[in-house]
Amino acid sequence: MPSCPSGHRSTATDFCDVCGLRLQTRSPTPPPPSHRHPTPPTPPLSPARAPAPRRPPSGPRGGPCPECGTSRAGRFCEECGFDFASQSGSHQHGQPGAEGASAGPRWRAIVAADPAYYQYMVDQGMLDSTRISFPAGSAQRRVALTGDRVHIGRRNASRGFVPEIDLGGPGGDPAISHVHAVLIAKPGGAWALLDPGSTNGTTINGTANPIAPNVEVPLHDSDRIYVGAWTVIILQKG
């Protein structure tokens, strides 16, 4: 039976009644997806893929998260952002650690709604434009990258989790996981990106395929990160 990739209950059979994403048909034991999305023409600020169905974890799941009880799939908990590597919760990351970015140049993230990305998703049939509208008048946000990690996601009030780059809330991006991706500070002031296994995937600089889950990807000045239904995050150094 078709189901919403974000886990919503829907009575419709084509698009989710709650968030408008196209419903996915899953078999009892689905194999890892092997298809590749075609690369569309690349307009300014436009990625080359729409959110894909949830990918299986890259490794075996471990024990439960000590903060929220969610089964472990990689370094970061997909629900509350707990870091299994440093054994620290999302609320403990405020001060830079040994690998913090304080010793290097300052970085910032420019968060914006990208109409070209949204239109591509609609054209590919991944979004129903009659149910999910592009957020007209959405303003850019600047978020300073500080500490040893910066979470990208949407808040979880029941668990007290608020990501540093919060894409949820009223008028927020409906295709974002609670912990969709994590920016990780590296020695010398560099940063890397990690997707802990988000539902709809994460792409960089318009590549056709999402980054592999639970694998750190080095980032550079002016890199563009695409997540959700319309969000682009542009990194700036200095």
Image: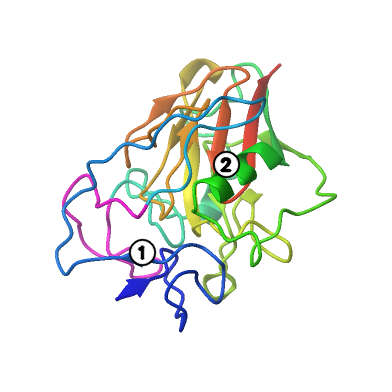
- Taking the spot 55% from the left edge, 38% from the top edge, the residue there is 226
The type of residue carrying mark 1 is: Gln
Specify whether residue 149 is painted magenta.
Answer: no
Above or below for 216 versus 82: above
Q: Which mark is residue 120?
A: 2
Real-space Cα distance between discs 2 and 1?
19 Å
Q: Which amino acid does the dot numbered 2 rest on?
A: Tyr
Asked where in the image residue 119 lies, by quadrant, the reply is top right
Q: Look at mark 1 in the image and give the residue it sits on.
A: 24
Secondary element at image label 1:
strand
Quarter of the image with the C terminus in it? top right
Residue positioned most to the right: 137
Residues rendered magenta in the picture: 53-73
- Residue 130 to residue 115: above or below: below
**Closer to the N terminus: mark 2 or mark 1?**
1
Q: Dot 2: what SS?
A: helix
Q: Main secondary structure of the magenta part?
A: loop
Closest to the observer: 200 or 119? 119
Residue 99 appears in the rendering: yes
Name the residue nearer the viewer: 1 or 165.
1
Q: Residues within 10 Å of mark 2 (few under 14, many from 20)?
A: many
* Placement of 125 over or under 94, stated as above or below: below
Quadrant location, the N terminus: bottom left
Residue sitting at x 41%, y 52%: 198
- Whether residue 114 can be seen here: no
Q: Tell me which residue sits at (14%, 64%) in the image.
A: 29
User: In terms of depth relative to the viewer, which is nearer, 11 or 148?
Assistant: 11
Query: In the drawing, does residue 98 fall left or right of residue 71?
Result: right
Residue reaching furthest bottom?
Answer: 11
